[in-house]
Image (cartoon, helix red, strand yellow):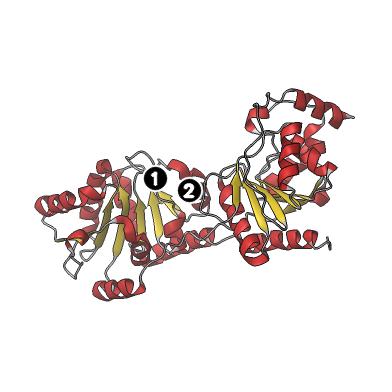
């Protein structure tokens, strides 16, 4: 009764639907799974789950919620959580199974799925909630919207408690941790890596990646100070604007008296080079060469624009400033595992860089970062196993 009243009030509060029929592409033939990733890190994990379903199982996948990504999944906007919109959506796509991510509940969609006897799973769940534009109090709605889910796979114990408080049964909930994301390891040319590694031999190296113009002075000052401790230290400096590379190299040579190699001029670093200024096209190579990476844009720029999981996946210890840009969640995960170190100023950057010149310390931080970047494969395999069993009728 409470669910009926709560759902009725929720549906009455739904915004008016636009006129006209939705323009969806044709449904592919065969079996289809609907994955809904409402945002944040759920998107990356759902895209990787979609890849496995498509490549390993030959199942068509419809993705909603995720922004445009390179994926073989069909990507569509999620329908308004309105009874008629949901009915039209499900009539067109006819999914065999539905997976919701992060904890977002869409009661109208869940109700229609239940009426059609579609299996429902929740993965990578943090806490149950209604869509951001539909929040409110509706008696009994959250509790009853959770009831149809066969499995609710949560990130941690706190998430499990949140779902139990909301009314989920203990038997529905499993604390699994997060699913895996697509590997952030960037490609590289092995012959280039081997040649540079031979030239640079055992020299300590650090990478300043995607450096904003207003951060260049702090990076140069940090290199200057740490050179006094490690005179063979090499800085690989990649400016955010490639057009600045030539002028930056000339300025460093003139003001610091350092030997600078500019890749666009076909210079390669040698045993006497203090600074190497390449372009941004080979980050997969630079991360592999540099045991320590400072991610630019995060200290004085508009925010970090490179994914910190890139150096994490390739074994480079990470330094970053307080402006995390679009990667706040990723930095939160890395910071909690002591897999990345935040610096608040140019002076902090100098101190942190000097600290990480100790190979043992850099290796420990890099190992922790790699563990974060590569976690979740077992969880994804568990989710895939559930999906396969349900679709095969054995669960």
Q: Can you see residue 221?
A: no
Q: Nearer the viewer, mark 2 or mark 1?
A: 1
Of 372 and 186, nearer the camera is 186
Residue 179 relative to residue 307: left or right = right
Most foreground residue, 74 or 358: 74
Dot 2 or dot 1: first in sequence order is 1
Residue at (62, 46) in percent of width and height: 25
Q: Quadrant of the N terminus?
A: top right
Image vertical order of residue 107 relative to residue 72, above or below = above
Residue tagged by mark 2? 331
Q: Residue at x 35, y 70 (%)?
A: 189
Please tell me how crowded label 1 is: few (under 14), some (14-19), or many (20+) other residues with Cα within 10 Å. many
- In percent of width and height, residue 30 lies at 72, 58
Tell me if 50 is positioned left or right of 213 in this view.
right
The disc label shown at residue 245, or none: none
Image point (68%, 42%), residue name: 103
Q: Are marks 2 and 1 in contact (CB under 8 Å)?
A: yes
Horizontal arrangement in the rendering, residue 32 relative to residue 111 (left or right): left
Residue 394, x across and y down, in percent: 84, 63
Q: Residue 149 in the image: x percent, y percent? A: 79, 47
- Depth check, front residue: 317 or 66: 66
Q: Residue at x 14, y 58 (%)?
A: 258
Q: How many marks?
A: 2
Rendered location of residue 180, percent (x, y): 59, 58
What whole-number distance in Å separates the C-alpha atoms at marks 2 and 1? Answer: 10 Å
Kindly tell me whether residue 237 is visible in this rendering.
yes
Secondary element type, mark 2: helix
Q: Quadrant of the C terminus?
A: bottom right
* Residue hosting label 1: 304
């Amino acid at each position: 009764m409470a669910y009926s009243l709560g759902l009725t009030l929720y549906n009455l509060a739904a915004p008016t639907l636009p006129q006209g029929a939705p323009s969806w592409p044709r449904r592919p033939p065969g079996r289809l799974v609907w994955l809904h990733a409402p945002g944040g890190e759920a998107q990356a994990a759902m895209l990787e789950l979609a890849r496995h379903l498509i490549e390993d199982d030959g199942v068509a996948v419809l993705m909603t919620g995720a922004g445009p990504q390179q994926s073989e999944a069909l990507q569509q906007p999620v329908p308004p959580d309105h009874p008629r919109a949901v009915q039209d959506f499900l009539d067109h796509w006819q999914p065999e199974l539905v997976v919701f991510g992060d904890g977002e509940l869409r009661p109208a969609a869940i109700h229609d799925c239940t009426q059609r006897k579609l299996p429902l799973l929740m993965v990578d769940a943090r806490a149950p909630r209604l869509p951001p534009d539909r929040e409110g109090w509706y008696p009994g709605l959250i509790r009853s919207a959770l009831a149809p889910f066969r499995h609710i796979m949560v990130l941690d114990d706190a998430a499990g408690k949140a779902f139990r408080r909301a009314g989920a049964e203990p038997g529905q909930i499993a604390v699994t941790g997060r699913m895996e994301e697509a590997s952030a390891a960037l490609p590289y040319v092995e012959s280039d890596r081997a040649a540079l590694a031979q030239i640079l031999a055992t020299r300590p190296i650090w990478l300043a990646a995607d450096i904003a113009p207003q951060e260049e002075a702090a990076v140069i000052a940090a290199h200057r100070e740490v050179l006094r401790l490690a005179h063979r230290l090499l800085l690989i400096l990649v400016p955010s604007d490639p057009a600045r590379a030539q002028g930056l190299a000339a300025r460093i040579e003139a003001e610091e008296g350092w030997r600078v190699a500019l890749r666009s001029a076909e210079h390669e670093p040698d045993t006497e080079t203090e600074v190497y200024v390449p372009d941004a096209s080979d980050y997969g190579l630079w991360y592999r060469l540099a045991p320590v990476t400072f991610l630019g844009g995060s200290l004085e720029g508009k925010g970090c624009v490179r994914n910190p999981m890139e150096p994490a996946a390739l074994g480079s210890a990470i330094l970053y400033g307080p402006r995390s840009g679009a990667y706040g969640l990723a930095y939160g995960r890395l910071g909690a595992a002591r897999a990345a170190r935040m610096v608040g100023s140019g002076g902090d950057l100098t101190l942190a860089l000097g600290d990480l010149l100790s190979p043992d310390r850099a290796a420990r931080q890099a190992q922790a970062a790699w563990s974060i970047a590569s976690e979740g494969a077992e969880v994804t395999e568990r989710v895939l196993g559930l999906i396969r069993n349900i679709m095969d009728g054995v669960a």
